[in-house]
Amino acid sequence: MEMKERDAMLKPYIEAIPDIVKYQIATKILLGIWLFLLGRLFRVLLNSTGRVAVSSGDFTFLFTSWQGLLIIVIALSTLFMYVALDLNAQIILSRDLLIKEDVNVWYCCMKAIRSIPRLINFKGIGVAIYILLIAPIIGIGFSVTLTKGFYIPTFISSVIEETPLYLILASLAAIFFAIVGIANLFILHGVVIDKLSIKDAGLRSKKIMKENGKDFLNQNIEFILVMAAVLGIIVFVVLILPLAITNILPLSDSLKRGLIIFLMLQGIILSFVADLLAMPLYMMKMTQLYFEYSTGQKYQYKGRKIRKHRFDKYALIASLIALVIFAIMINHDFDDIFPQDSQVKIIAHRAGGIEGAENTVSGLEKAWQIGAYGAEIDIQRTKDGHYILNHDGNFARVAGDNRKPEEMTLAEIKSLSVDGQPIPTFEEMLEASKGKMVLFTELKGDTADRQMADDAVRLIKEYGMEDEVVLISLKYDLINYIETTYPEMQTGYLTFASFGDTALLNCDYLALEEESATADAISAVHKQGKKVLIWTANKKQSQHHFMCSSADAIITDNVSQANEVLEELENRSDLSRIIDGIRQFLS
């Protein structure tokens, strides 16, 4: 591409940046106010039912009470509001930035809100669901900031990856939704710009993609490469090159560290700005292509009336001074803000994780031998009232027997084995772990009821292990019962999705699924005097992230790998410690 052509290609996007920034500020203010008010309303509705939060283990009331149904209706309206202000408004803004001399950001927002009724129909709801839930998972199509980080929880994705049939079905579903997403990429443009019905906009989008698929791909690749090159140059000049020079210069350790902190603060600002601009700029490109494919004419940028923005050099100087002062303050308390060592404990999943046979004594002992702080196990009740270890609803996966634990006697279960190891009773696991590890015992399956809770507490007390066992469950009612009836016992609630004052739930530990374990969520739990477990952190990147966090422990299948991560953290450079700290701050 010639230099003049590249400049002509970039000019409308560069000139649009001030208005995009104003749009982002305006929409985030509107959405922030909306979410704040809704949050207060939701809490009032929750409190009126005697609850402090709704979570994955306590959600049925949403469908059995007027408060729950009202929450669902309001939540759905919020999703449409997000689609309107996060996507429809971007399309209107993009159109105006490309063809109008003057742009009014608030007009774009109001126009987008007025477009919501055209989405409230069967097809519109399908489009909204795709944008909110499917696009973030498969990475095809537009998504909104509210759910852009949405993904399939690890405990579900791991089952899919380990089961061939599920993996094939999931792959076919991903291919299907990818095709649907690509075919309907311009559906919102048709609705918003040309005021078409959802059905007609979908037909137009499919026709556009069918006739212009190759050009669409080429233009997307070209645009992304150019934008990536521009961002790469900026990052190199502002961050990478100064960091390299700082490391070469013969400076004192304290001064060098201070400069690194200053540069990394600049990097945070740069990252924030890039995130602020990326989606609107890409939407401009998509809107340009929509015009070209709809009209059959090549788009020519005629220029816009650009308002002159007075650049206040004093504001820039003040910002730089503020960054310097902030960097000095951080440098002064560096070891407290960016600790070298991790205090996060390691808990082996299903007794020993991959170190040994699942939910067996040998697995637990191997996890203990390599330094695990604790072991998570799963107990279920047998037909004759004993408690044995098993994760699934039956023994098909681990022992080749399709029967459920509650359909078998203890003697029958003892005839089975897992990778050559006998299936243990709860008592055998208590004996094996006593004085060695903390046993995080999940009350599992269809037999996880109050009888199981009572029996488990009785056995734990018989062994004198009240301080060495934590009773955990996905069923909040069960954990609430144990915590209320046996306050001397330690309890933990496993949740992968929640809303409300989750930290106030009645338990000692909150086990958060990776996606929900943000820095704010962990801090809120700690403020209530509770501890935080992260489940199930198996990937090295995930283990690294949460071992740098303020979580109390991670549950993992790979204890050996987690130990390696701990060793790597102890040998980090100052730069690595800063980067890890920034990631925690932004999470």
Image (cartoon, rainbow, N blue to C red):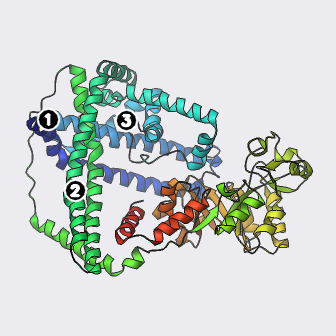
Residue 538 at x, y percent in the picture: 56, 55
Q: CA distance from mark 2 to mark 3?
A: 42 Å
Number of callouts in the render?
Answer: 3
Residue type, numbered disc 3: Ile
First-in-chain label (2 vs 1): 1
Residue 311 at x, y percent in the picture: 10, 59
Q: What element does badge 3 sit on?
A: helix
481 or 13, which lies in front?
13
First-in-chain label (1 vs 3): 1
Residue type, numbered disc 1: Lys
> Which residue is located at x 37 percent, y 54 percent?
32
Residue 204, relative to residue 378: is it above or below?
above
Residue 250 at x, y percent in the picture: 22, 77
Q: Is residue 491 visible?
A: no
Q: CA distance from mark 2 to mark 1?
A: 35 Å
Residue 508, relative to residue 282: is it above or below?
below
Location of mark 2 (residue): 236
For residue 100, which numbered disc appears in the image?
1
Camera-side mark, 1 or 3: 1
First-in-chain label (2 vs 3): 3
Camera-side mark, 2 or 1: 2
Report which quarter residue 105 is drawn in: top left
Residue 526, relative to residue 19: is it above or below?
below
Location of mark 3 (residue): 116
> Which residue is located at x 79 percent, y 41 percent?
400
